[in-house]
Amino acid sequence: MTKKILVLPGDGIGPEIVAEAVKVLECLCSTFDFDCQLEHALIGGAAYDAEGVPLPNNTLALARDAHAVLLGAVGGPQYDKLDRPLRPERGLLAIRSELNLFGNLRPAILYPQLADASALKPEVVAGLDIMIVRELTGGMYFGQPREIRERADGQREGYNTMIYAEDEIERIGRLAFDVASKRAGRVCSVDKANVLEVSELWREVMERVAQDYPNVELSHMYVDNAAMQLVRAPKQFDVVVTENMFGDILSDCAAMLTGSIGMLPSASLDENAKGMYEPIHGSAPDIAGQGVANPLATILSVAMMLRYSLGEPKLADRIQQAVGKVLDQGYRTADIYTEGSKKVGTHEMGDAVIAALREQA
Ligand code: NAD
Ligand code: IPM
Ligand code: MN
């Protein structure tokens, strides 16, 4: 069956890295028995510039109609002063929410070839393989009320609401336990239950979900300690499940263990494993347009798409193998460059992955 994939390049380095991931998809179609139809649409600042809104209706309709969505990144300093509803980030949050993509899988895997590129000692990160399961459509990102308001004394105050219903906690819990039961069988739920009521409920529901998974071990950790443990001894974790904002922060931290944020892919899934796939990094305005961004997180996001939404685990394996091969060959973009390796730009890295894929044919 032809798989319909919606491609949303977005802003900054988004179009550069997505172009390489699209080359990989096209290579799968021409080299292996894969049949896909790509459609492109606008999101974020690019959509605002063209149509005055960060998530045009047409983009959302195409996303609903597709089997999967591939997204680059959104945002940039030129949009930071816009009214909040018009900002690029709102487009991203809206598409996640509209498609009900509550389950965000962010795997932090250290490719052994990159042990030297990690900011941590090789022995601390060697063999690292963590899955962060981030709740993506709730918590403070979406909670009401939220506002900046003026008080009677003339001072303004800003506030947001971290709110989770039991069923929202339960479904992300189940996803984490399902994932863990196919891995090392350990879930660490990260919260701030020593301070927050919302975390107290989170912990209680996680305990309840755990009863349905006798083969998975549940532990709890406060988020401040988790940030420290991720840097001190990251290999203690198998699956980490956490709420939206804690997961945002911890996954950038975990990314750095693997050498660069340019290496971390993600899958955002609904109840039926329909999904949107994107690198966890942003639009990197500081390097946009220079052709130096690392496209591997986006290419690895295509692998996750094949595995989780398109039912093509063998093709997913092929992409991961190809990425391993180019790292073996010494190709490095600037963010993962170490002395003695071959420094390449975004295109060359994409070309090297394609060459490695063709060799597998
Ligand atoms: P960022 O992730 O864009 O960049 C942080 C640092 O990492 C920068 O130095 C950047 O050059 C580097 N980096 C990121 N991706 C890289 C890659 N593929 N290769 C090499 N280096 C890479 O985070 P930021 O600077 O805080 O945010 C920039 C903009 O991106 C903001 O507008 C923010 O809102 C947006 N953002 C979007 C997403 C998304 O679309 N999912 C995620 C995070 C941030
Ligand atoms: C991410 C980003 C987004 C988030 C922003 C751009 C809305 O940081 O995907 O990690 O916070 O979820
Ligand atoms: Mn983030």
Image: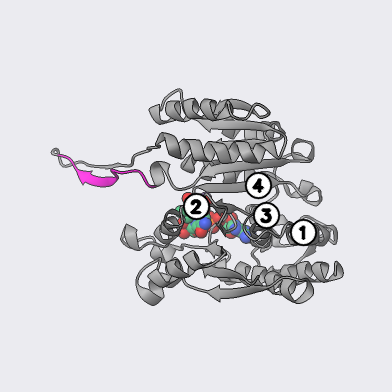
Magenta stretch bounds: 142-151
Categorize mark 3 by other alpha carbons within 10 Å: few (<14), some (14-19), many (20+): many
Name of the residue lying farthest toward the top: 194
Relative to 261, is 60 on the left or the right?
Answer: left
| Residue 254 versus residue 319 in the image, above or below | above
Mark 2 sits on what residue? Answer: 101
- Give the dominant element type of the magenta stretch: helix, strand or loop: loop
Tell me the amino acid under the disc marked 1: Lys
Please rate how many residues cluster around mark 1, counting C-alpha atoms within 10 Å: few if below 14, some from 14 to 19, many from 20. Answer: few
Residue under label 3, please give it. Answer: 263
**Which residue is more in the foreground, 90 or 217?**
217
CA distance separating discs 4 and 1: 18 Å
Residue 149 is one of the magenta-drawn residues: yes
Q: Residues within 10 Å of mark 4 (few under 14, many from 20)?
A: many
Is 41 left or right of 316, judged from the image as shown? left
CB contact under 8 Å: marks 4 and 3? no
The relative height of residue 154 versus residue 361 in the rendered view (above or below) is above
Q: What percent of the width, then of the height, locates residue 133?
A: 58, 42
Q: In the rendered image, which residue does mark 1 sit on?
A: 314
Q: Quadrant of the C terminus?
A: bottom right
Closer to the observer: label 4 or label 1?
1
Q: Across the whole image, how many numbered discs are drawn on residues?
A: 4
Q: Residue at x 60, y 57 (%)?
A: 279
Label 1, secondary structure: give it.
helix
Cα–Cα span, label 3 and label 2: 22 Å
Q: Amino acid at mark 3?
A: Met
Amino acid type indicated by mark 2: Leu
Q: Quadrant of residue 358?
A: bottom right
